[in-house]
Image (cartoon, grey):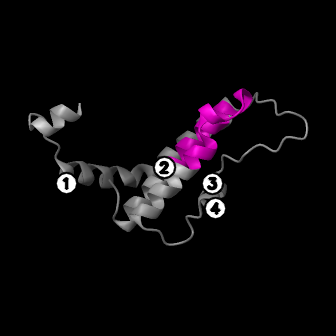
Amino acid sequence: MADELHSGRIRVAGEAVAAEYRETGADMAAEFAALLEQARAALADEQPLPQEVLPPIDPDAIAAELGLDRPATELDLSRLRRSFAFANHPDRVAPHLRQRAMIRMQVANMLIDDAQRKTGTGR
């Protein structure tokens, strides 16, 4: 794939993609609502272990966990994404928490994408 990109046979229209990304940002609230509804349905039968505190799936809680209330540069947001993924990726958690981790990753990625879009650093 990298060879194809470097060969010049494949062209990537960066500004067109960025414009489309910005346009889809308007639907972010609807995407969040749909994602959370699916998450609640998927986790309805979840059985936590005794004395276990489950990580939240609420966007406000995840935004606070990420520290998105503070100004951030593109580099900061990239670091937040990697750090959150390192700690919360479904492959890195106990099997009974994988569905929850997948949802947390989706919410975190949407929040970080939105933060990048708002700061003008969106992809």
Which residue is labeled 4 in the image?
Answer: 64
Mark 4 vs mark 3, CA separation in Å: 5 Å
Which residue is labeled 1 in the image?
Answer: 15
Mark 1 vs mark 4, CA separation in Å: 31 Å
Residue type pointed to by label 4:
Ala
Numbered circle sitting on residue 25: none
* SS at circle 2: helix
Which residue is labeled 3 in the image?
Answer: 62
Q: Position of residue 6 (x, y in %)?
A: 15, 39
**Is residue 41 something one can see in this rendering?**
no
> On the picture, is 51 further left or further right than 70?
right
Q: In the image as oriented, which residue stretches furthest toward the bottom?
A: 71
Q: Earlier in the sequence, mark 1 or mark 2?
A: 1
Q: Are marks 1 and 4 in contact (CB under 8 Å)?
A: no
Image point 85% across, 40% down: which residue?
Answer: 52
Mark 2 vs mark 3, CA separation in Å: 11 Å
Main secondary-structure element of the magenta-colored stretch: helix
Image point 59% across, 64% down: which residue?
Answer: 67
Image point 72% across, 46% down: which residue?
Answer: 55
Q: Position of residue 95 (x, y in %)?
A: 70, 27
Q: Position of residue 70 (x, y in %)?
A: 55, 71
Q: Are marks 2 and 3 in contact (CB under 8 Å)?
A: no
Q: Earlier in the sequence, mark 2 or mark 4?
A: 4
**Location of the N terminus (image quadrant):** top left
Residue type pointed to by label 3:
Ile
Numbered range of the magenta stretch: 84-109
Q: Earlier in the sequence, mark 1 or mark 4?
A: 1
> On the picture, is 49 further left or further right than 114?
right
